[in-house]
Structure formats: structure tokens, C-alpha cells
Image (cartoon, grey):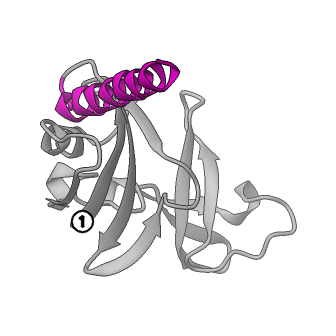
Amino acid sequence: MKKFKYYLMIFFVSVAVLLSTYAQAEIIIAQGKKVKFHYKLYVNDQFVETTENTGTIDYVDGDGTIIPELARQMQGLRVSDTKVIQLKAEQAYGQSNPIAFREISKTLLPQGVEPREGQVFQFTAENGSQLPGIIWKVYPHTVLVNLNHPLAGQDLAFEVKIVSIE
């Protein structure tokens, strides 16, 4: 009789595990769902970065935390699904805007820093927000800074893997 109860308990635990796994697999990404995912980012077919070693990206679908078109193309995916999502520059960070290039005095850079093309600095906008800026060109007394998003003007490919959906 003890053996029967043991096997019956094992049976019910197995059924419960299967049902919860099945229920999780049926949940899809939709408006308001909490999603965790990993990605690999490619720009011009060149690998740029991954979240595999740094932790998941967490967002609520529809909250605007991630690129809207990326979120839209992830809708309908389930846990463990993978998908490659291609985004044109206009769907990601937009085209590079020539108005976002500013020539500033070297005196506005941190003291003791010798600017080089390609360096990234944090600049404070008039409203107090922080903007990353890339030194585009160095002149004798000034630098040309590109305040566009570093990925502006770039077509992107995200290889996403869904980790969890709640």
C-alpha cells in the first residue's frame, strides 16, 4: 500500500509539472506582459554585443522601454522561442541628424583629457538630461561632437531568445 501511495504521489507531481510547463508554453508576449529576454545585436552583419553574460533585458510589453518596433515584432512569441528581427534605421534609432552635430570648446571637456576622434563623453543638455556624445573631429581649440544615438543611421539585427513571460 505504501508503494502505491508513493507512485500515486509521483504521478500527481509529474502531472502538475507537465501542466505548469504546458501553461507557461502557452503564454505569449502581448500588451502588459512582463518579458525577460536575451539578445545578440548585429550591425551591418557584424556582431556587436550580447546579453548572454550580463543578464536578461526586462520590460513590460507596450511600456516603451525597448525600441517599439522590436517590441512589436516580439509579440506572439513564447518562452524559449528565438527570432531574428531586422530593423531599418528608421525603425530603431532613426537616421543620423546633422543638427545633432555641435562644435564645442575643448574647455568644456573634462580637465586633463586630450580628445581623440571616437571618444565618447557624457554631456549635459540644457534641460539637465545626460547625452552621450562622440568626438567626431578634433580642431585646435574645439571639437565636433556627434550627439546622435551611437546606432542612429544603422540597420540593426537582433537575435532574441525569450526567457520568461508573466
Q: Disc 1 marks which amino acid?
A: Ala
Q: Is residue 41 left or right of residue 142?
A: left
Point out the stretch of residues depicted in magenta. 1-30
At a point 87% along the width and 68% down the height, the residue shown is 112
- Magenta segment includes 91: no
Residue 57 in which image quadrant? top left
The reply to whether residue 44 is in sight is: yes
* 38 to 150, vertically: above or below: above
Residue 120 in which image quadrant? bottom right
Q: Quadrant of the C terminus?
A: top left
* 79 to 59, vertically: above or below: below
At a point 80% along the width and 70% down the height, the residue shown is 113
Disc count in the image? 1
The spot of residue 141 in percent (x, y) is: 68, 72
Q: What is the chief secondary structure element of the magenta stretch?
A: helix
Q: Is residue 61 left or right of residue 151?
A: left
Q: Which residue position holds label 1?
A: 157
- Magenta segment includes 24: yes
At a point 48% along the width and 26% down the height, the residue shown is 3
At a point 26% along the width and 67% down the height, the residue shown is 154
| 88 and 159: which is toward the camera | 159
Badge 1 crowding class, 10 Å Cα cut-off, few under 14, some 14 to 19, many 20 or more, is: many
The spot of residue 4 in percent (x, y) is: 41, 23
* 140 to 14, vertically: above or below: below
Q: Is residue 88 left or right of residue 60?
A: left
